[in-house]
Amino acid sequence: MTAFWMVFCTPEAFLTLWAILLLLLVSARENIHPRSVATWSLMGVVLTLFLSKYTYQMLHANPPQLYLVDGLSVFFKDYFLITLFLVLVMGREYICLVESAKNEFFILPLFTTVGLMLLASAADFVTMFVALELVTISLYILVSYHRDSPGGLEAGMKYLVVGGMATGFLVYGIAFVFGSTPTGTLNFSMLKVLWTVPEPSQVVLFAMVLIIAGIGFKIAAVPFHSWAPDVYQGAPTPVTALLAVASKSAGFLILIRLFVGGVFATPHLKPVASDIFAWLAAASMILGTLAALTQRNMKRLLGYSSIANAGFILMGLCDLNQCSVTSVLLYLAVYLIALLLAFYIITHVSVLLGGEDLRHFTGLSQRSPLLAFGMTIAMASLAGLPPLAGFAGKLGVFVAAFSGHTGTYADHYPLIGVGVVCAAAGLYYYLSVVRAMYWQDPPETATLEISGATCATVLILVAALVVFGIWQQPLLDKISFAVSSFHFDI
Amino acid sequence: MNLLPVLMIFVPVLAALLIPLGLFSPRRVSLWAGGINLIIALKMYWMYQLDVGGYQFVTRIPLSGVHAFFPISLHFGVDGISLPLVLLTAIVTLAAVAVSSENIRRAKEFYIYLLLISAGAIGAFTALDLFFFYGFHEVALIPTFLMIGIWGSHDRKTVATQITLYLSAGSLVLLIGLLLFYFHAPTHPPTFDLVDLQQQLGAGSIPLASSQAIFLLLLIGFGTLVSLWPFHNWAAPAYRSAPPSVAMMHAGVLKKFGIYGLLRLAEPFLPQMHGAGSYLNLLLILLVFNVVWIGYVTIAQKDLGLMLGFSSVMHMGYLFLGIAAGLSFFREPQAIIPLTGVVLLMVGHGLSTALLFALSGEIRQRLGTLNMTEIGGLASKTPQLVLLFVIGALASIGVPGFANFTGEILIFFGSWHASPCPTVFCIFGLIISAIYMLRAVRNVFYAEPSQLVASKEIKDVTVIWPYLLLIVPLLTIGFWPKTITAMAQPSIERLLGL
């Protein structure tokens, strides 16, 4: 099969075509209801999920030039598609509740996901950059989707400016990478060969730091975090969910690709990167946790919590070995479930009760036991309490940080100490929601009407959190496949 | 494979799932669950083969491969150390449900949480895998926090936040200690499994330096959960605020998890240095503060609830004394006596504390306050309540004939040679506890009837069986300690590799 036809076998191409067709359909027919658009988008996601299963073998053998298919890319493609699926489900109910969104609201996330999937397969700095821009630009539109609300506009503006800056750092770094090689290549495999012997120059170190800064914005690590709380608060809740999960996991995907066995994994650069990650981790955990303690708006609180979580994941990553990748993937997987559950409930509460401040959650347990229960489980999982999946995630990053002790670069005991203190302090703000819902009496006692589909979604997500809390092996099987058939040797 | 321990975890969970359906009254469902569990626990007690010893009723379902990221398995079973604690949990659970009212506010939630605490406690005591050992304890803690926050009295929200943060922070320190233990234990492959650890680790297989560090973390972690001085601040206010059944479950059962953990992990695996500056000495100093300092604090209390709370903190000092004695005779035959005493005292203290908290709940329900300056002379109106309370008080003081006495005396015998000076302080503590307990009994029951008491129509306790449920084993073990020592002692010998 020629490369030209191969392109059409990729799940990205399929999803792009689906999205374009939907766009054409929507523009051709005026009176189409957003809900049916959402349904069509969901169908596209499911089909892509199947397609990516079947084309794996076919594409796998292909030597990577711009596009590579390995275990890691498969894992992340599934991950992004599942995220998109849940976000669309959330958005579909959001529409029923507010009736303000237009049809593109369900098509733009498809493009975001195409970008994310392409990113998972990027074998070259150019592909990586283009994919990341596709993600970011579609998110610019989605974040400021509520054009008439000042909060939405502020969020959009901040995300645009900060996102532009991140892009700047990234491009600058990539330019230095290009300049450091005699022949001027940007392909990961070739760069890895070039940089192994002899040791790369200081220019590469500089490029590496710039790229870390650029990715730092994506994962919202301190000191590149300032956009997160405002954007989280201002964006429509389903978009916040997409942004929170997708942006963060995309950033970590790139970090794993580049730093674990990848181009920057030379003996000279790896210890430096490991140290930088450790410092970023400590700063993110401390600042995210401290700032979250006083928040009263749930989305803002989750914004700061996402900064702290970036710190925890970086703590797991900072040894840059196989164990770190396992822990990061596990953490991201369980983080996805808990975070989407939380945002799902926030969507309902904000629409039914007129806001997403902590005070809107007071006495929720008496008005809607199911929503309160779901929120409690989500918060407990984010806080890392057993027997929920979040505990396995937290345990994983601590295990990874500990096992680095027997390995190579740095002794992470101080970092682990910071992690423990922050995890304990984190309980306070996650608990504040539970406290409001259970320990306080509601301003009024009328029960909230919730549809059967909502109940089912909440219960499924709760069940997933409980099951993966006790039995992580299904997740770990997927992860170990991702790690074992990783394109680079670790 | 024998599923009885797993069944004991499932019965309360199933009952908790049954309650929201609303087919039966929540209290009735909980009573049935508690009753069934007590029968299962007694059956296990009966069926436990003393001549075989070791872990019995074992279920093991591996959840991961050999060289997995988390080498965990669903591994449950009991030995002579955990079986008495499981029986204690079953007894206290049934009593706690029985003393709770039928028409409490938000009754469904109340009984669901109570059952979850019970399931978590049984899980923690029967788990033979460190992952689930830790996890089940947290499962029991979370409903505890919620219950104090929802049904507590006094400044319930502050108190509930305080206990949540204290115990969660303690649990995290414990988690790090357990992880350090996991990474430093030279087992192949690395394992969370207690039975494998016990088979593979010999004396000194964890180097002294790391053993010290692990012990310090475990001491702080478990110590916070058990209210070791100076990590005890959460305890007394929480027990005063908590609904009686929650105080019974936590002070009576759940708190023993910390001592149980030290017994399981520190005693066989973590050798300690002796002499000045060692962590063993630190423990001895802290536990003397637990007994003497908290003893005096207890004397000063004016509120019966706070007094019982502090008294429960104080008595943890004796358990720590037994643990310290066991550690100073690390894996030597002399460690058997104090550690057997620890098992006995855990059960005895659990029963007597649960009894006292239940009765103080009865008093509060009748008078609306537990302030000892306002209540007095109850004896003339509620003779049965007085009798029960005096029994509880005597047991708590450590009068011969009750389980507490046998436990304490074994601990003192054992620790005398290891650390005479702290032992003397602790024996002195018995006098302190006699002072505050008897003073409380005098004030509350035998003084001149106060205005509050005299002006009210006060009913005596009518349902006696929950209290008898607690008293009968207290006396049985007190007069015939072999009911527990016969199975605890061989298990401790095996644990220590003797």
Image (spheres, coloured by chain):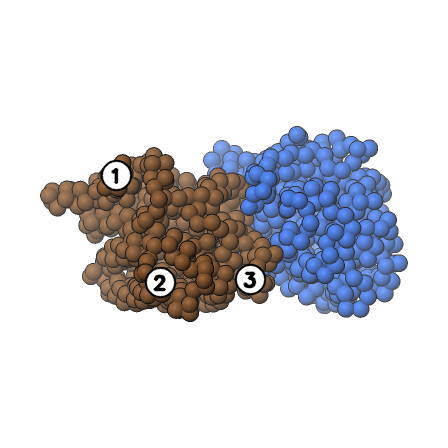
Q: Whole-percent x and y of residue B291?
A: 76, 63
The image quadrant that residue A424 belongs to is bottom right
> If the image is split into quadrants, where does the N terminus of chain A sit?
top left
Badge 2 or badge 1: first in the primary sequence? 1
Chain B painted colour: blue
Q: Is residue B65 visible?
A: yes
Q: Which of B444/A331 is in front? A: A331
- Of discs 2 and 1, which sits in the foreground? 2
- Say which element carries label 1: loop
| Distance from Cα at disc 1 to Cα at disc 3 | 45 Å
Q: Identify the mark at residue A409; answer none if there is no mark.
A: 3
Chain A painted colour: brown
Name the residue type under label 2: Thr
Name the residue type under label 3: Tyr
Mark 2 in CB contact with mark 1 (< 8 angstroms): no
Instruction: Assess disc 2: are there few (<14), some (14-19) or many (≥20) residues with their C-alpha within 10 Å of its C-alpha.
Output: some
Residue annotated with mark 1: A2
- Say which element carries label 3: loop
**Residue at x 58%, y 57% (from the top left corner):** A407
**Residue at x 36%, y 36% (from the top left corner):** A57
